Amino acid sequence: LLSGASVWTTKSIPRLGIPTVWFCDGPNGLRKQDDEWVTNISSGRVKATCFPTASCMACSWDVELLNQVGEAIGRECRNQDVPMVLLGPGINLIRHPCGGRSFEYFSEDPILTGHLASNLIQGVQSQGVGTSVKHFFSNNQESW
């Protein structure tokens, strides 16, 4: 389980009944590569909805909206055979406006970030898809 079969999949262990698991990036929607990408990095991605970024959705302060977005992302994951793990949301705090990845995070406020992220996660998981929050901290070093 600690090594992959490809860039985005785990190795299966048939003797234990453990299947291959797809991991897909998902800060603002499902980002799944097609099967060919495993060997040809220049090939395409599977088409999916690109939702507004976390920082954009955070401006709404609308936890129900985030839950609905999570449900929609969860449905897309199921439709694309990604029932196990969506890598996201990112929950690092925005500490500087020049941070190159700040768009992936909800806010500089930890309370708001927690409420919004948990509602997005609940929406995804309501569709039977697991999530993995990422970038808890220390992903904010840039060289500007």
Image (cartoon, rainbow, N blue to C red):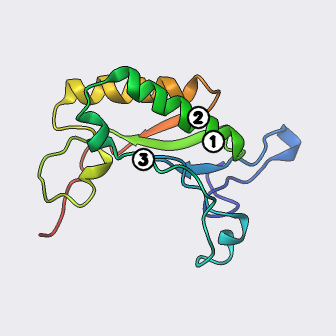
* Label 3 to label 1: alpha-carbon separation: 13 Å
Would residue 40 be found to the left or right of residue 50 on screen? Answer: right
Residue 137, located in which quarter of the rendered image? Answer: top left
Crowd rating for badge 1 (residues with CA inside 10 Å; few <14, some 14–19, many 20+): many
Secondary structure category for the residue under label 1: helix
Callout 1 amino acid: Cys
User: Looking at the image, which is closer to me, 91 or 58?
Assistant: 58
Can residue 139 be spotted in the picture? no
Would residue 89 be found to the left or right of residue 41 on screen? Answer: left
Where residue 9 appears, as percent x and y from the top left, is 66, 55
User: Looking at the image, which is closer to me, 19 or 93?
Assistant: 93
Callout 3 amino acid: Pro
User: Looking at the image, which is closer to me, 71 or 94?
Assistant: 71
Is 144 rendered above or below residue 129? below
Crowd rating for badge 2 (residues with CA inside 10 Å; few <14, some 14–19, many 20+): many
Can residue 56 be spotted in the picture? yes
Where residue 108 appears, as percent x and y from the top left, is 16, 38
Residue at the spot of label 1: 77
Residue at the spot of label 3: 27
Residue at the spot of label 2: 74
Where residue 24 appears, as percent x and y from the top left, is 57, 51
Q: What is the quadrant of the C terminus in the image?
A: bottom left
